[in-house]
Image: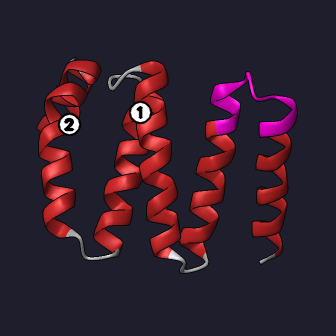
């Protein structure tokens, strides 16, 4: 619970004093979402992870590593809440983008 209040304060400071650092603000939001998840507040974590993922995609594009990482975090949150159909749809929709972004690296991982 203490970590949650520290992360909320950090996000508030990021938004107030470093609002032009969009990546820094998104990282702070992601950390807060992960804290909610670790505390068992899965619905709040999911809400925040949806926002973080959409923001990364809007800022850097869907093939950026931050966008891909946030996609995986979002899918995990959906699975934790038993939103299997939504997780499946999301991953099926995004898989071609991820495969193009990771290219040969992904192919090597899949074949091992």
Q: Residue 78: x and y, percent?
A: 31, 65
Q: Residue 62: x and y, percent?
A: 33, 26
Q: Residue at horizontal 54%, vertical 80%?
A: 40
- What is the quadrant of residue 65 in the picture? top left
Q: Residue 61: x and y, percent?
A: 38, 21
Q: Report the magenta residues as a range.
A: 15-25
Q: Rate crowding at label 2 as few (under 14), some (14 to 19) or many (20 or more) other CA atoms within 10 Å.
A: some
Label 1 element class: helix
Q: Mark 1 points at which residue?
A: 67
- What is the quadrant of residue 14 in the picture? top right
Asked whether, in this view, residue 67 is left or right of residue 105, the answer is right
Q: Residue at horizontal 47%, vertical 32%?
A: 56
Q: Does the magenta stretch include residue 106?
A: no
- Quarter of the N terminus within the rendering: bottom right
Question: What's the mark number on residue 94?
Answer: 2
Q: Say which of 72 and 43 sits in front.
A: 43
Asked whether, in this view, residue 60 is left or right of residue 63, the answer is right
Label 2 element class: helix
In the image, residue 99 sits, relative to residue 68, either above or below, namely above
């Amino acid at each position: 619970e203490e970590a949650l209040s520290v992360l909320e304060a950090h996000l508030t400071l990021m938004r107030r004093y470093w609002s032009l650092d969009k990546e820094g603000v998104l990282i702070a939001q992601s950390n807060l979402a992960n804290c909610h998840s670790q505390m068992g507040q899965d619905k709040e974590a999911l809400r925040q992870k949806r926002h973080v993922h959409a923001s990364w995609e809007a800022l850097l594009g869907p093939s950026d590593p931050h966008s891909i990482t946030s996609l995986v975090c979002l899918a995990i949150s959906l699975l934790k809440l038993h939103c299997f159909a939504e997780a499946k749809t999301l991953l099926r929709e995004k898989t071609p983008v991820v495969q193009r972004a990771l290219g040969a690296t992904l192919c090597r991982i899949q074949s091992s």
